[in-house]
Each structure stands twice: as C-alpha cells, then as structure tokens.
C-alpha cells in the first residue's frame, strides 16, 4: 500500500519515492501548517506520517 493520500494533502512538506514511501521535504514546516499536518497524519490510511513536537524530529516519523 502506498501513501499517496498522505502526501498530496501537503505536497510542500511531503513527497513519495519510487516505492510509494513518504519522503519528508521540509522537516521544520511553518507553524501555520500545523493544523494541516495534523490532519494529514490523522487521515493517512497507512499511518506513514507521525507529527512530533519540536526537537523530536518530524522526519523520524516517516515509514522506512
């Protein structure tokens, strides 16, 4: 299963690789995107996105 739905919600923050895995483009997106980030994480059917608080590394929550 790929993560297309997750990626397309915030294309400026996420992309996907050739295998369909989420790639983080911006590990420190603007605070103004927080609501959309949380929505993308909740709505991701594969659970590929996890939003962590500052200092924990947003990029670490991506499936590998």
Image: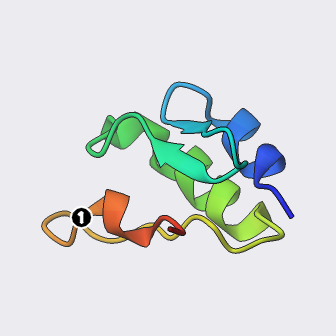
Q: Residue 11: x, y in percent?
A: 61, 28
**Picture layout, residue 55 above or below residue 6:** below
Q: Residue 38: x, y in percent?
A: 57, 60
**What is the residue that sits farthest to the left in this orientation?**
55
Residue at 32% x, 35% y: name it: 30
Image check: 35 left or right of 52?
Answer: right
Q: Residue 23 or 31: which is nearer the viewer?
A: 23
**Picture layout, residue 2 above or below residue 14:** below
Q: Which residue is mark 1?
A: 57
Residue at 76% x, 54% y: name it: 3
Residue at 50% x, 45% y: name it: 23
**Picture layout, residue 25 above or below residue 6:** above
- The quadrant in which residue 56 appears is bottom left
Dot 1: within a 10 Å radius of its alpha carbon, few (fewer than 14), some, or many (20 or more) residues? Answer: few
Q: How is the image coloured?
A: rainbow
Image check: 37 left or right of 2?
Answer: left
- The quadrant in which residue 54 appears is bottom left
Q: Residue 30 or 9: which is nearer the viewer?
A: 9
Q: Residue 8: x, y in percent?
A: 74, 34
Residue at 81% x, 56% y: name it: 2
Image check: 18 left or right of 30?
Answer: right
Q: Residue 1: x, y in percent?
A: 86, 64
């Amino acid at each position: 299963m790929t993560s297309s739905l997750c990626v397309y919600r915030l294309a400026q923050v996420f992309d996907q690789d050739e295998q369909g895995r989420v790639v983080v483009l911006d590990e420190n997106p603007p605070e103004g995107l927080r609501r959309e980030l949380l929505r993308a994480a909740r709505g991701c059917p594969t659970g590929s996105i996890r939003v962590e608080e500052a200092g924990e590394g947003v990029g670490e929550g991506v499936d590998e």
